[in-house]
Image: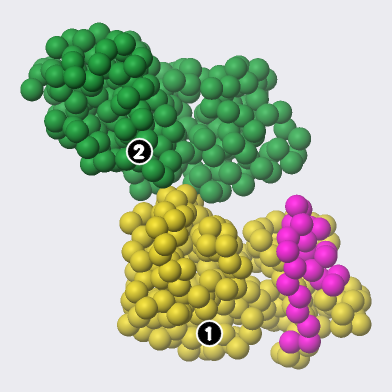
Chain colours: A green, B yellow
Amino acid sequence: MITVGCDVGSLFSKAVVMDGDEIIGKRMIATTGRIAAEVHDLLKAVMKSAGISADRVDCLGATGNGAALVKDAAFREDTITCAGAAAGYFLPEVRCAIDVGGQSITSIAIDEEGGVRNFMRNDKCASGSGRFLEMMSAKLGIALPEVDKIAAGAKTVVEISSQCGVFAESEVITHVNNGENKGDILAGVCSAVAKMVSAQGRRFGAAEHFTLLGGVAKIDTITTMVRKSLGGCYHPFPFDPQLATAVGAALLGDAD
Amino acid sequence: MFAGIDVGSLTAEALVIDEGRIVGSEIISVLPNPVDSARAAMGALLARSGLDWGDLTYTVSTGYGREQIQRQGLARENLSEISCHGLGAHTLDPEVRTIIDIGGQDAKVIKLDTKGRLEDFVMNNKCAAGTGHFLEAMSRALGVGLEELGPLAMKSKKPLAMSNRCTIYVETEVIHYLQRGASREDVAGGITLAMADRVLSLVRRIGPESKIMITGGVAKNKAVKAALEKALGMKIVYPDLDPQLIGAYGAAVYAAAKGGSK
C-alpha cells in the first residue's frame, strides 16, 4: 500500500511517500505565505522523489497548522496523533515523545499499544521552540544546518539567562558586542533550548524511555544536552526526526 | 539641592529638586554601562541648568546598577526602584494607591497604603509581552515610530484580535494581518488590546485600588491607558510630571528627606 503524509508546519512543510513502513520519497520546503501553492508543489516534488505517479497513491493524510490547505487529503489529523503514531510504531519501547517544532514544544505520552495517552503543549511562548533557535542563530549569522559544527568548537558555554526569546536575543547581541566567541554563545543558546525541552519533558515523565522529534531534534548538540539532563533511555527516531509527524500521517493512512 | 538618578533598561533619568521644586531633569538613552549612563544623565542636567556636581547636597541612585553608581561616588545612597516609584507617585498625588509602571523591559504594579508605604507589588521581568519592548517590536512591524502607535490605535474602529501572547508570535500575526490588507489602524488597535491584556493579568494579581496612576515610558501611549481603563472600569491618572521621571523624582524626594535632616 502506498500512502503519503503531508505535514504543513509553521516554519517548514514536509511530505513523505511510504510503501508500507518504508519511506520511498521525502521532501521538505520552507512554509512562507502562499501555502496552497506550496503544498501543491511539495506533493508533486515528493512523488517525483519516490519515482512513482500520483495515481498509485492509496491514501493522502494531512496534518499540521495548514492541513486544511492540503486539498486532496483523504483525512486530516492533528500533529499529536501523527507524531505519537510514528514514535509508537517505530519505537515500541518509548513512552514519551517530545516534539520540538517551529512554534511549540509538545510532550506526548504513548501507551503500550502505541496510542497517545496524554499530551502537554506549550505554544503560548516561543521559548525553546525552533523559532527561538532560528532567531538566536540568525543573530549569530549561523545557519541551522551549521549549528552542530560551530557549537562543537565551543570552549565554554556562555550562559543565556533569559527564557523569553526577545530578551534572550538582546543577551546574544550583548555577548557578540562583548567579543565573546560565537561557538561559545551558540553553545549557550543550545543549552537554553535543551533546558526548556528537558523541563517540559521532565514534568511529563520523560525520564524512562523517550525520543525527541521535530526539527530541533536534528541538532545533536541539543539532543546530547537533553539526554544528559533527563537521564533515562533515549531512543533516536530511525529517520529524520523533522519528518516524524508526516511519517505518522502516512502510517495512519495505512491503518485506516 | 537634592538629586535622583534612575537607570532603566533603555533610558536613564536624572532629576534635581530644591526646596521641593524640580529645578532640572534629563532623560537620555542608556550607555552600555549603568555608571556611565548615570554620569551622562546627571552631567547633561547640570550643564543645562548651569550647576555643578558640588551643588548637590545628597544624591540617591535607583534602577539598574544602583549599587555600582553609589560605589563610584555618584550617589550617597541607593534605593530600590519599587520604593522610589512609590515615593515619587505618592509625593505627586497622596491619594494614589496603585501604580502601574511599564518600562522598556519590565512591568510592575505597586500598591501603597494610605500613608504611601509599600503594601505589595508584582513584577513581570521574564516575558517581553506587556512591556515597552512589545510595543517597540510591534511599531517596527507596522513601520511606524513608537510614539505614532498610540494615535494610530486611537483611530481604530474595529481592533483586530491577536490570538497569541508571545511577542515573537504576535509580530508574525501583525505581519500576516498587514499582508492580507488589514488597516494599520485596526492592527494598531489589536496590538494595544494585546498589550493591555498582558498588563491586566499583572494588575489583577494584586487587586487594584483607586487612585491608580500609570508611570513609565508606556504611560505616554494614550491608547494603552484607555484600554486599561476600559477593561478595569476604573479611571487611571496620568502624573503631573513626565511618567518616565517618577523613579528619579522619588529618589530625589528620598534624598531630600535623608540629606536634609543631616
The amino acid sitting under disc 1 is: Tyr
Residue tagged 1: B238
Q: Residue at x 37, y 35 (%)?
A: A38
Q: Residue at x 49, y 39 (%)?
A: A132
Looking at this view, is B6 or A166 the one in front?
A: A166
Q: How far across and down, in percent of the image, does residue A143 sit?
A: 58, 28
Question: Up-down: is A194 above or below A71?
Answer: above
Residue A92: image quadrant is top left
Q: Residue at x 39, y 43 (%)?
A: A34
The amino acid sitting under disc 2 is: Ala
Q: CA distance from mark 1 to mark 2?
A: 51 Å
Looking at this view, is A138 or B235 the one in front?
A: A138
Q: Does dot 2 land on a helix, a strand or a loop?
A: helix
Q: How far across and down, in percent of the image, does residue A61 sit?
A: 19, 28
Looking at this view, is B4 or A248 the one in front?
A: A248
Residue A77: image quadrant is top left
Q: How far across and down, in percent of the image, does residue B150 sit?
A: 51, 75
A15 in the magenta segment: no
Q: How far across and down, in percent of the image, does residue A230 sit?
A: 38, 22
The quadrant of the picture occupied by the N terminus of chain B is bottom right
Residue tagged 2: A37
In the displayed structure, does residue B198 sit left or right of residue B50? left
Disc 1 vs disc 2: which is toward the camera? 2
Q: Mark 2, residues whose alpha carbon is within 10 Å: few (<14), some, or many (≥20)?
A: few
Q: Mark 1, residues whose alpha carbon is within 10 Å: few (<14), some, or many (≥20)?
A: some
Residues in magenta, as a range: B22-44
Q: Which residue of the protein is positioned furthest toward the left in this rendering?
A: A256
